[in-house]
């Protein structure tokens, strides 16, 4: 088990890699919500084209039967269905839809609709306290796996595979404004990864995917364009 934290734009790194060299891509991309990151400005002009570009690059480096797992929230403030854009891009790349889960964060307190639209249907503000976990496979859904290479127990599979809604508390947003909870990354890796896999996170952020991979004994690679967050990841992994 090893890990690599690479201070580079994910597209530059992926485009330089050999084809079919990664088993699992697990990530939560920037949501383009104008979040206050350290040095990176979250204001991608053409988010849909950018999404298609990195999904295309990720598909190329995925091995056959490799899994692409993406956690995303729609930009509901502007009615931009990011999760549907991801599905469309994956479909264009001939990835097979494996399924999805709804991550329920239970974080809405004191909901207030848009001014002038309370109690009337002129422009009701639809809030999201959930995010989507989109799951795709390359070439084939079936991945031959020895039981000795499994990372998941029967009890975990029963609980996670039958429940469409996953109730997981959000991570404390310390040192990074958009951290994925490690319970979510851990659950996805146990469901889809095997011993010996290489796990890649294009948007490593605070290193949650990489930390979950390390805890499970998996090799991981993360690209992150912010040097300060790269150091944060190194500190967490140590």
Image (tube, helix red, strand yellow):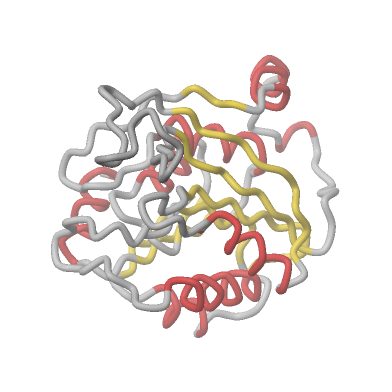
Q: Position of residue 232 (x, y in %)?
A: 20, 51
Q: Nearer the viewer, residue 58 or 113?
A: 113
| Figure check: 123 above or below 227 | above
* The quadrant where residue 137 appears: bottom right
Image point 68% across, 14% down: which residue? 155
Expressed as whole percent of the image width and height from the top left, the position of residue 33 reads 30, 57
Q: Nearer the viewer, residue 108 or 71?
A: 108
Question: How many numbered marks have been drawn onto this rendered protein structure?
Answer: 0
Left or right of residue 114, residue 91 in this image? right
Q: Which residue shows up at 44% across the image and 78% down it?
A: 13
Q: Return the x and y of residue 2 as percentages of the image width and height.
A: 44, 54
Give the x, y percent position of residue 159: 66, 18
- Residue 27 is left or right of residue 238, and the answer is right
**Quadrant, the C terminus:** top left
Residue shown at the point (64%, 43%) measured from the top left: 195
Left or right: where does residue 146 sit relative to residue 176? Answer: right
Which residue extends farthest top? 155
Q: In which quarter of the view is residue 10 placed?
A: bottom left
Q: Residue at x 61, y 48 (%)?
A: 134
């Amino acid at each position: 088990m090893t890990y690599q934290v690479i201070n580079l734009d994910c597209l530059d790194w992926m485009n330089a890699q050999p084809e079919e060299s990664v088993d699992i891509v697990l990530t939560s991309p920037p949501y383009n919500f104008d979040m206050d990151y350290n040095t990176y400005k979250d204001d991608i002009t053409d988010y849909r084209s950018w999404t298609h570009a990195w999904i295309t690059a990720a598909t190329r480096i995925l091995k056959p039967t490799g899994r692409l797992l993406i956690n995303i929230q729609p930009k509901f403030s502007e009615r931009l269905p990011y999760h549907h854009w991801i599905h469309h891009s994956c479909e264009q790349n001939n990835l097979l839809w494996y399924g999805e889960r709804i991550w329920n964060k239970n974080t809405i307190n004191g909901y207030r609709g848009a001014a002038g639209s309370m109690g009337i249907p002129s422009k009701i503000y639809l809030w999201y306290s959930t995010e989507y976990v989109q799951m795709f496979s390359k070439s084939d859904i079936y991945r031959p796996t020895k039981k000795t290479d499994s990372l998941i127990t029967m009890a975990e599979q029963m609980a996670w595979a039958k429940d469409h809604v996953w109730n997981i508390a959000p991570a404390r947003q310390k040192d990074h404004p958009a951290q994925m909870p490690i319970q979510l990354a851990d659950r996805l890796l146990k469901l889809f990864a095997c011993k010996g896999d290489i796990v890649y996170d294009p948007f490593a952020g605070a290193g949650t995917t990489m930390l979950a991979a390390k805890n499970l004994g998996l090799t991981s690679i993360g690209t992150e364009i912010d040097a300060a967050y790269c150091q944060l990841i190194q500190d967490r992994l140590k």
